[in-house]
Image (spheres, rainbow, N blue to C red):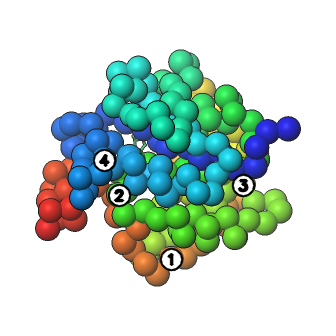
Amino acid sequence: MGKRYVGVVLAGGQSRRFGTAKAIAKKNNKAFYKYSIDALAPIVDCLLVVTNSNLEHIFDKEKTKIIHDTKKYQGQGPLAGIFTAMEKYPAEWYIAVPIDVPFVETWVYEHLISQIEHGVDAIIPIVAGKRQPLIAIYHSSTRNLIEKGLNKGERSVQKLLEKCTIKYVPFDEEGPFININDVIDYQQYIEG
Ligand SMILES: Nc1nc2c(ncn2[C@@H]2O[C@H](COP(=O)(O)OP(=O)(O)OP(=O)(O)O)[C@@H](O)[C@H]2O)c(=O)[nH]1
């Protein structure tokens, strides 16, 4: 039997809008991806950074296992990263975090985990009226649906959610969900 909680740091994106690898952009002299690792490390049985061969050298192997997207789906978006974790590390729940949310905190995930109930495929935050499906947890029951979608070239997480039983969890605090997509976001939230 696999583990109960596998942490999945989604780290195979191209950072096209940001211009350089977002994972190693810094907040208070600490790389963004380390905030993601530190948020999950206390609550998971195993922590994976899912990336690709071009980016893997930037990650420190301390506390994590660095793996590559399954070849067939490499670079096909965050669902490729979640699927890869499901395929390589059997577990009940997969706890996802992107590498561009340097305000994320462990309590967010503790709250999501506290919402687990039988029959639910994924637990997704709702923040300021928006879904946050990459700071979320996915049951292993979603693996086949993700795979089917990827085989059809569907990368959209929203599309996956339409096919699943989702528990949406409202959060009042927006801070931990701030996501840095481009240099304007960086100036506003990190330097500002
Ligand atoms: N493993 C894996 N992670 C991915 C992939 N695509 C995106 N991600 C990660 O998913 C999260 C959200 O992705 P985006 O915000 O679109 O980041 P991005 O793709 O690097 O940025 P843009 O190139 O500007 O769209 C980030 O943590 C990315 O590193 C992928 O193909 N594989």
Q: Where 63 sits versus 88, above or below?
A: below
Q: Which residue is mark 1?
A: 171
Which of the two marks, 3 or 4, is nearer to us in this view?
A: 4
What amino acid is found at the position of numbered circle 1 in the picture?
A: Phe
Q: Mark 2: which secondary structure?
A: loop
Residue visible at 14% across and 67% down? 192
- Asked if disc 2 is less than 8 Å from ligand 1, the answer is no
Q: CA distance from mark 2 to mark 3?
A: 26 Å
Residue visible at 57% across and 63% down? 109
Tell me the quarter of the image containing the N terminus: top right
Q: Mark 4 or mark 3, which is nearer the start of the sequence?
A: 4
What amino acid is found at the position of numbered circle 3 in the picture?
A: Asp
Q: Mark 2 or mark 1, which is nearer the start of the sequence?
A: 2
Residue furthest to the bottom: 172
Q: Which residue is mark 4?
A: 31
Which of the two marks, 1 or 3, is nearer to us in this view?
A: 1
Q: Where 87 sits versus 4, above or below?
A: above
Residue visible at 53% across and 68% down? 108
Q: Which residue is mark 2?
A: 102
Image quarter for ligand 1 equals: top left
Q: CA distance from mark 3 to mark 4?
A: 32 Å
Q: Is residue 154 visible?
A: no
Q: Where 167 sits versus 101, above or below?
A: below
Image quadrant where residue 166 sits: bottom right
Residue furthest to the right: 1
What amino acid is found at the position of numbered circle 4 in the picture?
A: Ala
Q: Mark 4 or mark 2, which is nearer the start of the sequence?
A: 4
Q: Is residue 62 visible?
A: yes
